[in-house]
Amino acid sequence: MIRLLSCVLTLSLLCGGGYWIKERYPPAEKLLSKILHSSSIQIIEPGFSLDYIIEKTGKKHSPLSAEVRYYPYAVLEVKYSRSPKKTEEAFMLWSLTNAELVLSTKTWQTTHGFQDCLIAKSDHMDIKILKSLSAGPLSRQKIAAELHLENEELGVFLQACCAKKLIIHREHDYRVHLDTPYLTTRPITKLEIPLTYKPMKSLEPLPQRYPLESIVAFASSIFKDDFCIRSSQQVYLPVYCLTFQGDEGPATTSYWNSLNGRELKL
């Protein structure tokens, strides 16, 4: 009887405490919800099985090892002005490992340079300057003409980019301080293969280098004022890691995207 009363009292205290948290301190409610649901994570549902990928490699022998690794990504539902008369709604898929934006789920082509921009705390003007220089070095006058800025006004922005080590000034030209930069000014991932999710428990995902909150803040800072993030969530992409014994050499390991069935260059 005493044990029963103790259980009832404990349950009442927990319920009362939960109600107090919800009414008096909303941030704690979100934290409590995150803790309660931490045992289940959302993964992108594979489009191809592990057996199919092993067969696709064309190897005559079975792999020495075959495992699934779960890479963290951020999915942002956004809206932005594509033109003065057109608002577009889209999704963005960001890697939480290297902070690059996936441009297409079919090819898995990604940007190259957003990670440096995130580290440098770049803004919208930084991205516009980097985009204008992506094709090659330009003079200050040509950058000003392309971005429709006064020469003196542009000088302030160029100096800021140089200080952040995003661009370099050599002789009369400016260039991107990055090998083969590839950036985009459109906040969109082409969902040529749709994303569907399913909850998973009892798995160990790879650690994220950049938290979801950092990607949300970064995306908000580099796109225009009418850019809006409607929702955000963290998901995991299953990647097949296959190791085969070489015919005349050491074992080799390859990584395969479970969504589109293509090999990933990690």
Image: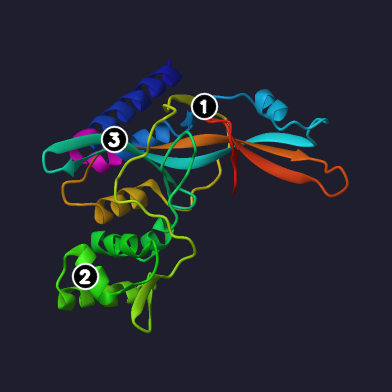
Sequence-first disc among 1 and 2: 2
Name the residue carrying label 1: 200
Outermost left residue: 85
| Camera-side mark, 1 or 2 | 2
Q: Residue at x 30, y 60 (%)?
A: 127
Sequence-first disc among 2 and 3: 3
How many labels, in total? 3
| Camera-side mark, 3 or 1 | 3
The image shows residue 36 at horizontal and vertical percentages of 41, 32
Sequence-first disc among 3 and 1: 3
Is residue 266 depicted above or below 164 in this figure? above
Name the residue carrying label 2: 144
- Callout 3, which amino acid? Ala
- Callout 2, which amino acid? Ala
Give the distance between the C-alpha atoms of the residues marked 3 and 1, in whole angstroms. Answer: 26 Å
Please rate how many residues cluster around mark 1, counting C-alpha atoms within 10 Å: few if below 14, some from 14 to 19, many from 20: few
Q: Residue at x 20, y 46 (%)?
A: 227
Identify the image quadrant of residue 65.
top right
Q: Main secondary structure of the magenta part?
A: helix
Name the residue carrying label 3: 90
> Considering the image in quadrants, where does the N terminus appear?
top left
The image shows residue 102 at horizontal and vertical percentages of 43, 43
Compare residues 15 and 45 and report the one nearer the observer. Answer: 45
Residue 1: numbered disc:
none
Tell me: 225 left or right of 52: left
Please rate how many residues cluster around mark 3, counting C-alpha atoms within 10 Å: few if below 14, some from 14 to 19, many from 20: some
Q: Which residues are magenta?
A: 22-29
Is residue 156 depicted above or below 216 in this figure? below
Give the distance between the C-alpha atoms of the residues marked 2 and 3, in whole angstroms. Answer: 31 Å
